[in-house]
Amino acid sequence: MDQAPEALLLRSDTAGVATLTLNRPQHYNALSLALLDALHDTIGRIARDDTVRVVVLAGAGKAFCAGHDLKELRSTRDRAYAEGIFRRCSEVMLALTRLPQPVIARVHGVAAAAGCQLVAQCDLAVSTTVARYATSGINVGLFCATPAVPLSRNVPRKQAMEMLLTGEFIDAQAALRYGLVNRVVEASALDAEISSLTAAIVAKPAAAIAAGKRSFYEQLHDGLDAAYAAATQTMVCNLLTDEVAEGIDAFMEKRKPRWPAS
């Protein structure tokens, strides 16, 4: 087993399948800058590894991924720092799409905000019946502009806007209906379902899969870089407001936010 620095990201390879596990279970696998860096570096290595045919993205502990690390976002109101975090997150998302190998999200628990973004950005997603999904940044005053980029490319517009505007969770069956995930199974069947899907892909020619994936996104997502660049700036500006400062503080202090008067 390969481990990224500080074991924030675990890697396990079996029969052409590389499983990457977000490993901050005590923080619900929140995407700290260090974890984003580990993801970006590992994806880069996998892109050059011909022995890997499929990537599975998983989470340790109870959650798949709770989104960005709010304590880290709240640690400073420096614009360059905020830009660095959101830019790195966008780079990770783009790297997943540019990866020659298909990426499957293995969603066993909550996928919120940037965690929901990860699910939407993966090529495929398999969910347990108990997993829940939300673009919940708006609950702390931070509109999920960058998660909206892949969400709006997976989910019909009205459903995407409802998720973005309300921050409310949807269940796995709703995620299936919306097109956010491909399959929903009981938790006990999750790994078997993932294995079935990866086996079907591994059985196909690697070159055809890589070329097909590249072609699919080139024709479907023309302008993705520009979308992420614009959304990143939206999130940076939003993060640095008093509303978000209060929203994150309230979340960490487990109280209702006292929004500044408009």
Image (cartoon, rainbow, N blue to C red):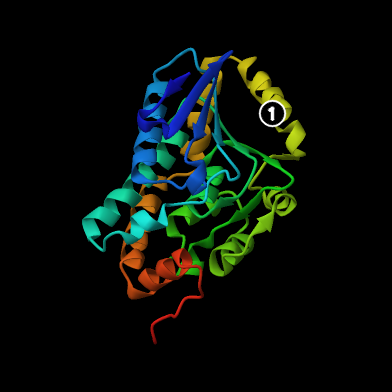
Q: Nearer the viewer, residue 38 or 96?
A: 38
Image spot of residue 244 (x, y percent) = 39, 69
Badge 1 density bin: few <14, some 14–19, many ≥20, Cα 10 Å: some
Q: Quadrant of residue 158?
A: bottom right
Image spot of residue 171 (x, y percent) = 70, 54
Q: In which quarter of the image is residue 105?
A: top right
Q: What element carries label 1?
A: helix
Indicate the quadrant containing the C terminus: top left, top right, bottom left or bottom right. bottom left
Q: In this view, does 75 lie to the left or right of 136?
A: left
- Hey, which residue is sitting farthest bottom in the picture? 261
As displayed, is residue 251 above or below residue 54?
A: below
As displayed, is residue 220 above or below residue 254?
A: above
Q: Which of 88 and 222 is in front in this view?
A: 88
At horizontal 72% and vertical 48% (from top left) the residue drawn is: 130
As displayed, is residue 37 above or below residue 260?
A: above
As displayed, is residue 140 above or below residue 96?
A: below
At horizontal 61% and vertical 17% (from top left) the residue drawn is: 202
Image spot of residue 97 (x, y percent) = 47, 36
Q: In this view, does 42 lie to the left or right of 165?
A: left
Q: Identify the residue position indicated by label 1 in the image.
A: 191
User: Which residue type carries mark 1?
Assistant: Asp
At horizontal 29% and vertical 56% (from top left) the residue drawn is: 82
Q: In this view, does 31 lie to the left or right of 184?
A: left
Image spot of residue 104 (x, y percent) = 58, 33
Q: Is residue 193 left or right of residue 86?
A: right
At horizontal 58% and vertical 69% (from top left) the residue drawn is: 166
Q: Nearer the viewer, residue 226 or 94?
A: 94
Count of marks placed on residues = 1
